[in-house]
Image: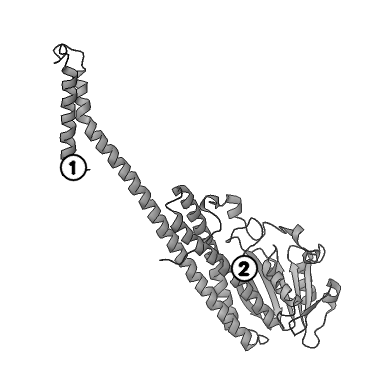
Amino acid sequence: MYLHVRIAGPVAKVKGALPPHHAARNDGAMDHPGTDSLPSTLLPDPDTGLIFARILDGNGGSRAIDWDAAARWCPTGGETLWMHLDRTVESVDDWLRDEIGISEATVEALVSNQTRPRAFREADSLIAVLRGINFNPGAEPEDMITLQIWARADRVITLRRRILQAPRDILDQLERGAGPRSAGDLVTEIVEQLVAKMGGSIVDMNERIDELEEEEDDTEVEDVLDVIATIRRNCLGLKRHMSPQHEALMQIARDPPEWMSAANSRDIRETIDQLKRYLEDIDVSKESVLVLQDDINNRAANRSNHTMYMLSIVAAIFLPLSFVTGLLGINVGGVPGVNDPQAFWKTMFLLGGVLAVQLLIFRRLRWL
């Protein structure tokens, strides 16, 4: 019936609304969550901000170099230098400006906390600000992480503030000898990884809506509505970041640098089309949970109305009976049957007759 979304786990265990401090958290709220579980080679240098540096050999592999070697590196034989930096280190912006020769405005875009996705060209360099799904412990799908990219034909610099999975996955590919071979391949692979991981979160949410539709009769209405509120919040957060990301990738596709190959441009266009489908899926998912929410609310309202209806019928049945018993119970002289030992049974017979007549009338009126 719908294209649906999944948040793993039973309904009763899914979190409801995000706490205000979590929902409002931006890219700068947490520097290095979960760093204790990372290998030391992926921890940023506190002085230089270098997380890792690799020289791509042009055949899918790479070799690691330290900060001094990266700072002195000169392109030779089709090699490409990839440096992954932590932009929270204060010396990073000075190094980008003074050593790499990046303009002040571009450096500000690369290290700023203003992280709306965008992309632009500066001479033969490509600058992009993109966002990826936060897979850190305790994160929500809409709590996304920014990755800034500065790239030219022989050098790619990526900067992040919080830990992001995509660069680590690409690093693993290079370690296996199956990674990108050029700057264009590297930028394209980063874009593909970021978008593909968004798709996984959308598929998870869609599957969860399927489960909600199957479980809604067996769970408390409040629990289902809490999950629906979380899904809607996730959809809104993803849409808020993915829409400008779509425009950023469109800008790259419209004006690619010369060092990006035709295959790179084709892959970027495919990624844009994939991202567009994800945006459409989010819209359908939002409509799906709204329909589900309306259905749940309508069912709850119908159950409430049915309960009120039955209470009204009961009140209508006992109203004349209460009137008769109340009238016979008044403490004044002349009440019939006071001295008749059979008066109680006669009264019960009378009340039974009134009840039978009422039920017959209600049945004919189709109230019962």
Residue found at x 46% / y 62%: 286
Residue 9 in picture, x, y percent from top left: 55, 56
Residue found at x 58% / y 74%: 248
Question: Which colour style is shown?
Answer: one colour
Nearer to us of marks 1 and 2 is 1
Quadrant housing the C terminus? top left
Is residue 157 placed above or below 327 in the rendered structure?
below
Residue found at x 63% / y 59%: 26
Left or right, residue 186 beside residue 69: left
Q: How many marks?
A: 2
Q: Does residue 101 show up?
A: no
At label 2, which amino acid type do we have? Arg
Q: Quadrant of residue 196?
A: bottom right
Q: Quadrant of residue 151?
A: bottom right
Pointer 2 residue: 131
* Residue 363, numbered circle: 1
At mark 2, the secondary structure is: strand
Viewer-proximal residue, 262 or 305? 305
Is residue 38 placed above or below 280 in the rendered structure?
above
Residue 251 in picture, x, y percent from top left: 58, 79
Q: Does residue 175 show up?
A: yes
Left or right, residue 269 beside residue 367: right
At label 1, which amino acid type do we have? Arg
Q: Earlier in the sequence, mark 1 or mark 2?
A: 2
Quadrant housing the N terminus? bottom left
Residue 38 in picture, x, y percent from top left: 76, 62
